[in-house]
Structure formats: structure tokens, C-alpha cells
Image (cartoon, rainbow, N blue to C red):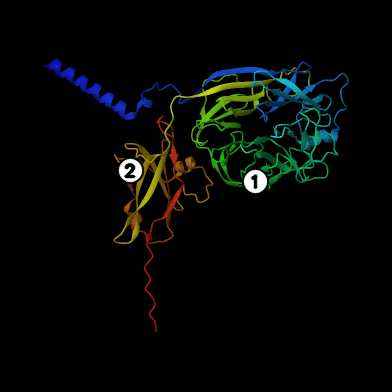
């Protein structure tokens, strides 16, 4: 009988374990080491390698054509038989560059590569000398639907002092054979650094154009590296839009308010809105939606990233997975539109795509172009071997994480006509299905106590360390949890005394099945009666 009881006990435990596994779902029974999203079929190849010394080809632009072509622009630097005239000491001083970065005696060329066979092979179709520029700086380039090339440059770095800072756009109407300057762009009051130019699905062109006060002789900034400390942010990221294939432009539209940001990238969402990213190179990485209504674009707020590294170039797959790259070849993914980012497994080629530019192709391929090497000096006899690389791979989604929502409802006492200091918290999937038996974090802090912050000056993580009260609560079978603050809050009669609260789920990612969620910071007055009902005036 004893052996029978032991066997029966084992069978019960196995049945219990099997039942628990079913309750967790099939996705949770998979190998825990298997990532939710990974890269497959990764390939790295050299697209262009210069033959002339010092072997310098860098700083790509990567963009599609109107008939299935693909283009990569880059800067090539070579040493001519007779070195060119060196930049003047004054101009070199104004640009404020490190030793070894003088390109003025070299031949600089804007090189344009074309592929007409789905990126299998590439050929040079355009090569234009840039003899009066420190660097080509052609990061923002595009081909219009009528077959014209647009190429933006950084005129502020011109070695020719007669070139104005707003002369930043060149156009080719003969497939790159010749280039002509367009009319001056904006005011010459600022220095412009065109960084990204993308074409939306309807042909609208969006230019990401950071700018700051120009420098040099006659200004209050003698060198490029001078900064005024009594300003909020001198480097401003702005957007310009063209609805006629680059012939005219509307803007600027500032984004990332209050942040010093010189580089950004964005994706077009299925609903036509745009999603911009402030990458982790800068102080406040995060995302910002820009909402579209025909020719009107309106930016929402900058939302700081919850976790992970925000990449510098980003694309969106048909599975709504964001894939991005950070120099010199680190890849990341997000399935919640950039609130949380995760390292992408299955890719290699680290160091091969510095200053990257990424695209998601219609066939599911991810393509990312950049140059091998970093921001290297050109002088002192150093052989660079900088060349242009292209990474391609596909995204395999092993499991879709489930989106979540938290709903906070303050309890109401109908008899006494006042809101209580107690709350009903509901945790659901995005489709509204309740999530039972899940732990939530409920944090609150009283007004003027340590941790209280009306203006979001201090990060939440730090505020939670210095004050407030953190409660761990668990949802019931209906996906709801109840929180009752101490009774003293219901006895408060000071109508101005308030408290702040935040409810969070899975912020540490410990539950791989679900996405994290954090409510907005909610603030309530502790004493919250309904206003008395007014009586009608008596008629005299």
C-alpha cells in the first residue's frame, strides 16, 4: 500500500505540473533560452572598396529608387599626385577639428552606387569632386519618383568662405552625371547638419535637419566647439516636408524639445503617422510620435525609453517589429513601438556598419548599410581601409509577446457622495481579456514628501528610492486587484493635499510572455467630495 501511495502521489504531481504548463500557455513551454525574436540568414558583404590611397570610403546614405533600384552614397577620399591647397589657419581654427582630420589637401568625391538586381551587385554611376568642402556629408539623400537625385550637404564645413551655410541642397536630373545647386535653404543665420531623408509611402519627403547658431569670424562663437551655457539647447532637431518631390519645402517643425540632438531616424506607421527615435547616443533616449493629417504634422511629447538601447537607425517589419542598428554594428529589436529594446541575436559583423542606415524590404529582408571602421583621422600616414558594407538578414518571430493594459478606477461612496482613497486595479491583455494571478507594483507618495515631483524633474527610479510607499499586489481570478490607502487619508480635510501614484506590471521583463506596462503618473486630492447640489433661486 505504501508503494501504491507513493506512485499515486507522483502521478498527482505530474498531473499538476502538466496542468500548470497548460495554464501558462504553449509559448511558455518552449526553450527558455530561445529569444522571442532573432535574425536568420545573416549575410555581410563588401559593396565598395576604394583602390586609391589612403583607402577611405565612408559615411553612407542608403535609399530606394522609383523603379526598384537601390542606391548607396558615400564619401571617398584619395591623395592626388599634387596635393590640393591646404585650408587656411583661420578656417581650420574655426572648424575646431582634432589633429589628423584635415582633408583639404586630399581629393574628396561624392560617390553614388546603384543596384538594379535587388542588391546583388553594385556599380558606380556618379562621382563628383568636392574640392571646397571639409567632408561631403551627404547623409540625407533621396531619389524622387520622377527620377531626380536630391543630395543635402553640410555647407557650414565649406573651406570656401564665400559659401553660405544655407546652400545645402544639390540636385541631379541626369542620373548623377551632373549636379546643380538648388536655391538657398532657410536662413544663413544657422549652421545646418542634414542627417536623414526618407520618402513616405505617398511620395512625401521628410528631411531631418538639425541646426545650431553658425560659428566663425564675425560671430559670438569663434569655433564650432564653442557652446553658450545660458541657452536651453542650441542644437535643435527639426523636420522639413516636401509634397512636390523636393522642389519646395515646408518647415521647420521642431521635435525633441529641450534636447540637444544632432541625429535621428524614424519609421512611417501603418496609420500614416510617424514615429521618431532619440537614440542612446544622446542624453534622453526615447521616442516621439508625429501625427499626420494630410499636409499637417503635429508632434506629440518625447517619451523616454523604459529599457534597453535605442538604436540610431530603425525600420518597421510587416509583423510590427522594430529593428534597429547602433554603430558600429549592434542590432536591437522592439515589439512595443520602441518603449523597450532588446539585443537581436543571430547577427554578427560588428564593426562593419559604422553610421548605419537600415531598411525593411517588401520581401521581408532587412538591409543595413554602413562603413567599416569608425570616425578615423585621415592623416599621419595611417592606412584606413575604410570600405562600404551591406548587412542583410531576415527576422524570425519565435513568439509574439502579449500587450498589456492597466486600468485604475478610484472607488466612489454613493452614500456620502465622495471619492475614497481606495482603488480598483484591472490588468488586461490588449484585447481586454483579464490577466489573473499577476503581480503589480503600486507606488504612491504624498505631496511635498521625498519622492514627490510635479514637473518630472527626477527619474521615477530615483524617486522610488528616496521616498513614497511601494506595495506589491496580485490580481484575482477576474484580473482585478484592490488597494486601500491608510485610513488617515480619508480623514484629511485639507482640500489641497494630494498624492501621486503609479501602477506597473512586469517592468523587469521577468515574465517573457507579456509586455511591460506602466500607467501615467496619476495625482488625486485626498479629500474629494462631490460639489453640493445648488438649489434654484427663489423668484421674487
Q: Residue furthest bottom?
A: 540
Q: Which residue is mark 1?
A: 254
> How busy is the neighbourhood of tag 1: few (under 14 within 10 Å), some, or many (20 plus)?
some
Q: Hey, which quadrant is residue 76 in on the image?
A: top right
- Image spot of residue 526 (x, y percent): 39, 56
Instruction: Pick the quarter of the image with the C terminus.
Output: bottom left
Q: Residues within 10 Å of mark 2 (few under 14, many from 20)?
A: many
Q: What kind of element bears circle 2? A: strand
Q: Quadrant of the N terminus?
A: top left
Q: Nearer the viewer, residue 188 or 294?
A: 294
Residue 351 is at least partly visible in this image? no
> Is disc 1 in contact with disc 2, using a CB cutoff of under 8 Å?
no
**Earlier-in-chain disc, 1 versus 2:** 1
Does residue 191 show up?
yes
Along the line of sight, the residue nearer the viewer: 306 or 404: 404
* Up-down relation of residue 190 to residue 79 (above or below): below
Disc 1 element: strand
Residue 527: mark in rendering = none
Query: Is 90 placed left or right of 315 in the picture?
Result: right
Left or right for 271, reference 247: left
**Separation (CA) of disc 1 from disc 2:** 42 Å
Above or below residue 219? Residue 143 is above
Q: What residue is at 44 percent from the left and 22 percent from the top? A: 34
Q: Is residue 461 above or below residue 177?
A: below
Q: Which residue is the extreme one toward the left? A: 1
The residue carrying mark 2 is: 480
Q: Position of residue 162 (x, y in %)?
A: 86, 39
Amino acid at each position: 500500500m505504501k508503494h501504491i501511495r507513493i506512485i499515486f502521489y507522483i502521478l498527482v504531481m505530474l498531473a499538476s505540473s502538466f496542468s500548470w504548463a497548460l495554464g501558462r500557455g504553449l509559448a511558455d513551454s518552449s526553450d527558455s533560452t530561445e529569444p522571442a525574436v532573432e535574425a536568420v540568414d545573416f549575410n555581410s558583404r563588401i559593396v565598395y572598396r576604394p583602390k586609391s590611397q589612403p583607402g577611405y570610403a565612408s559615411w553612407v546614405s542608403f535609399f530606394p529608387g522609383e523603379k526598384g533600384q537601390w542606391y548607396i552614397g558615400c564619401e571617398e577620399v584619395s591623395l592626388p599626385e599634387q596635393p590640393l591647397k591646404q585650408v587656411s589657419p583661420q578656417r581650420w581654427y574655426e572648424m575646431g577639428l582634432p589633429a589628423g582630420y584635415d582633408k583639404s589637401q586630399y581629393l574628396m568625391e561624392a560617390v553614388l552606387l546603384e543596384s538594379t538586381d535587388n542588391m546583388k551587385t553594385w556599380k558606380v554611376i556618379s562621382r563628383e569632386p568636392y574640392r571646397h568642402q571639409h567632408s561631403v556629408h551627404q547623409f540625407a539623400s533621396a531619389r524622387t519618383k520622377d527620377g531626380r537625385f536630391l543630395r543635402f550637404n553640410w555647407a557650414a564645413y565649406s573651406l570656401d568662405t564665400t559659401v553660405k551655410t544655407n546652400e545645402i541642397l544639390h540636385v541631379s536630373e541626369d542620373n548623377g552625371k551632373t549636379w546643380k545647386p538648388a536655391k538657398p535653404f532657410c536662413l544663413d543665420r544657422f549652421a545646418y547638419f542634414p542627417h536623414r531623408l526618407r520618402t513616405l509611402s505617398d511620395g512625401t519627403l521628410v528631411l531631418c535637419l538639425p541646426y545650431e547658431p553658425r560659428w566663425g569670424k564675425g560671430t559670438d562663437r569663434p569655433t564650432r566647439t564653442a557652446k553658450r551655457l545660458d541657452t536651453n539647447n542650441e542644437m535643435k532637431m527639426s523636420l522639413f516636408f516636401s509634397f512636390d518631390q523636393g522642389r519646395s519645402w515646408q518647415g521647420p517643425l521642431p521635435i525633441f524639445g529641450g534636447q540637444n540632438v544632432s541625429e535621428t531616424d524614424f519609421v512611417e506607421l501603418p496609420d500614416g503617422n510617424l514615429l521618431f527615435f532619440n537614440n542612446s547616443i544622446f542624453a534622453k533616449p526615447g521616442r516621439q510620435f508625429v501625427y499626420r493629417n494630410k499636409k499637417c504634422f503635429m508632434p506629440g511629447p518625447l517619451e523616454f525609453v523604459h529599457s534597453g538601447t535605442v538604436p540610431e537607425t530603425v525600420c518597421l517589419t510587416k509583423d510590427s517589429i522594430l529593428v534597429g542598428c547602433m554603430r558600429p554594428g549592434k542590432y536591437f529589436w522592439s515589439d512595443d513601438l520602441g518603449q523597450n529594446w532588446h539585443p537581436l541575436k543571430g547577427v554578427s559583423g560588428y564593426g562593419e556598419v559604422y553610421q548605419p542606415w537600415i531598411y525593411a524590404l517588401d520581401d521581408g529582408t532587412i538591409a543595413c548599410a554602413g562603413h567599416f571602421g569608425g570616425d578615423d583621422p585621415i592623416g599621419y600616414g595611417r592606412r584606413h581601409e575604410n570600405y562600404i558594407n551591406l548587412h542583410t538578414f531576415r527576422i524570425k518571430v519565435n513568439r509574439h509577446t502579449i500587450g498589456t493594459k492597466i486600468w485604475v478606477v478610484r472607488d466612489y461612496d454613493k452614500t456620502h457622495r465622495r471619492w475614497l482613497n481606495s482603488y480598483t486595479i484591472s490588468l488586461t491583455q490588449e484585447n481586454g481579456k483579464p490577466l489573473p494571478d499577476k503581480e503589480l507594483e503600486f507606488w504612491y507618495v504624498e505631496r511635498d514628501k521625498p519622492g514627490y515631483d510635479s514637473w518630472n524633474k527626477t527619474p521615477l527610479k530615483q524617486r522610488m528610492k528616496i521616498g513614497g510607499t511601494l506595495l506589491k499586489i496580485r490580481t484575482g481570478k477576474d484580473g482585478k486587484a484592490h488597494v486601500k490607502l491608510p485610513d488617515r487619508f480619508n480623514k484629511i480635510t485639507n482640500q489641497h493635499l494630494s498624492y501621486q501614484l503609479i501602477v506597473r506590471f512586469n517592468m523587469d521583463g521577468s515574465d517573457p510572455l507579456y509586455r511591460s506596462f506602466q500607467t501615467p503618473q496619476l495625482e488625486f486630492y485626498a479629500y474629494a467630495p462631490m460639489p453640493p447640489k445648488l438649489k434654484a433661486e427663489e423668484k421674487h
